[in-house]
Amino acid sequence: MIISTPTPRLEPVTEGNFDAVCAVQVRPDQTHLVSPVVKSLAEAYVHGDTAWPRAVVDGEEVVGFVMAFLDIVWDPAADPAGRRSGLWRLNIGAAHQGKGYGRFAVGAVAEEVRRRGGDRMYVTWNTGEGSPEPFYLGLGFRPTGELSGAETVAELLLDPAPVA
């Protein structure tokens, strides 16, 4: 008998998992650092051409939410290529933090960016108490020296996608 163990995966947000996705809440000390999922889903609706919202699921349980931005036009004066992709939002449920789901979700976004031909991905974060800065630095993101509003902009260089 083969016993399968649940592994994290990303799934589109659907009518079937919408309520569970909207119920994802970070720890109370993190709420000032990341918008609630429902705001992200509204932004995904408004920016449907670039937003890539996904539920982070383990087994049958929604444990988090991640949203990427794919191929947005940045500042052509500062970035001659003019397009960027990266992590827009990451919410891992308070009870599920510290279990590798955030690392998994960032890696899955990196794979999607790479699959679409990207060689780097971006993220922003607020600084200060409880900032996710150490998490992102630990994953290899490096500040670019830019700010998006008051948030630090960082990039992660991606290894090329393997040739099939």
Image (spheres, grey):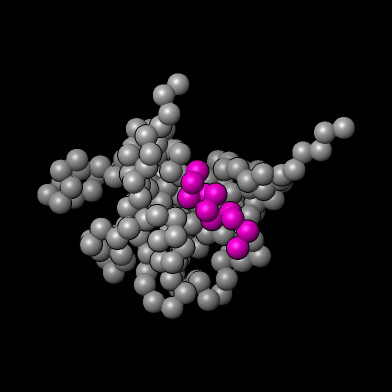
The extreme bottom residue here reads 129
Q: Is residue 112 magenta?
A: no
On the picture, is 24 further left or further right than 150?
right
- Residue 47 locus on image (x, y percent): 37, 46
On the picture, is 58 further left or further right than 149?
right
- Residue 149 locus on image (x, y percent): 27, 65
Q: Nearer the viewer, residue 9 or 50?
A: 9
Q: Quadrant of residue 118?
A: top left
The extreme top residue here reads 164
Q: How many marks?
A: 0
Question: Residue at horizontal 29%, vertical 45%?
Answer: 84
Against 54, residue 97 (above or below) is below
The extreme left residue here reads 77
Question: Residue at horizontal 32%, vertical 52%?
Answer: 155
- Residue 116, can we see it? yes
The magenta stretch is 98-108
- Residue 52, can we see it? no
Q: Is residue 104 magenta?
A: yes
Q: Quadrant of the C terminus?
A: top left
Against 109, residue 138 (above or below) is below
Question: Residue at horizontal 32%, vertical 58%?
Answer: 142
Question: Residue at horizontal 43%, vertical 78%?
Answer: 129
- Residue 83 locus on image (x, y percent): 25, 42
Q: Nearer the viewer, residue 56 or 36?
A: 56
On the picture, is 138 further left or further right than 21?
left
- Residue 106 locus on image (x, y percent): 48, 50
Query: Magenta stretch mostly in which secondary structure?
Result: helix
Q: Quadrant of the N terminus?
A: top right
Q: Nearer the viewer, residue 65 or 43?
A: 65
